[in-house]
Amino acid sequence: MPEPSVIRDTVASYLKTVATGSAADVAALYTEDAVLEDPVGSEPVRGRAAITEFYSALENLRQETELLAVRVAGNSAAFHFRVRTETPDGVVEIEPIDVMTFDEFGRITSMQAFWSAEDVQVR
């Protein structure tokens, strides 16, 4: 099991990479066989190649992320954060809560994002 500091570092890297990295950079934080469910209730995305494709939708967007709270227990973390995305229609803001599990090296093995359309704000 990774140390809590390793998990916190991966969460910080994840948020930074979502805001400024490529889809491949984000997917590199996941294990090869990881599973992503974003949002919870949608069809799970399985494997690094599919996860890279999932994050490719973010590559040409201007985004900022901010960690609001993180809790680590065992090999898992739950964290609340804000994402601000600039679009032609204005700024879209959402504050999801993600739950991730990690392998012994601090790589993400699963991610579930808790949010729905009613949580999205356009400013």
Image (cartoon, rainbow, N blue to C red):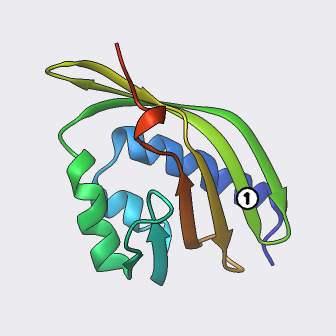
Residue at left 56%, top 73%? 110
Residue closer to the observer: 55 or 105: 55
In this view, the residue farthest toward the top is 123
Residue 31 seen in the figure: no
Name above or below for residue 45 compared with residue 67. below
Q: Quadrant of the C terminus?
A: top left
Residue closer to the observer: 48 or 89: 89
Residue 63, percent from left and from top: 34, 31
Name above or below for residue 89 compared with residue 35. above
> In terms of secondary structure, where does tag 1 sit?
strand
In-image side of 83 versus 96 (left or right): left
Residue 44, percent from left and from top: 41, 75
Residue at left 51%, top 62%? 40
In this view, the residue farthest toward the left is 88
Residue at left 81%, top 78%? 1
Residue closer to the observer: 68 or 29: 68
Q: Give the quadrant of residue 100.
A: bottom right
How many numbered discs, if any?
Answer: 1
Residue at left 59%, top 36%? 81
Residue 16, percent from left and from top: 48, 41
Label 1 neighbour load within 10 Å: few <14, some 14-19, many 20+: some
Residue 18 seen in the figure: yes
In this view, the residue farthest toward the bottom is 33
Residue 8, percent from left and from top: 72, 52
Residue type at tag 1: Ala
Residue closer to the observer: 33 or 40: 40
Question: Badge 1 is on which residue?
Answer: 77
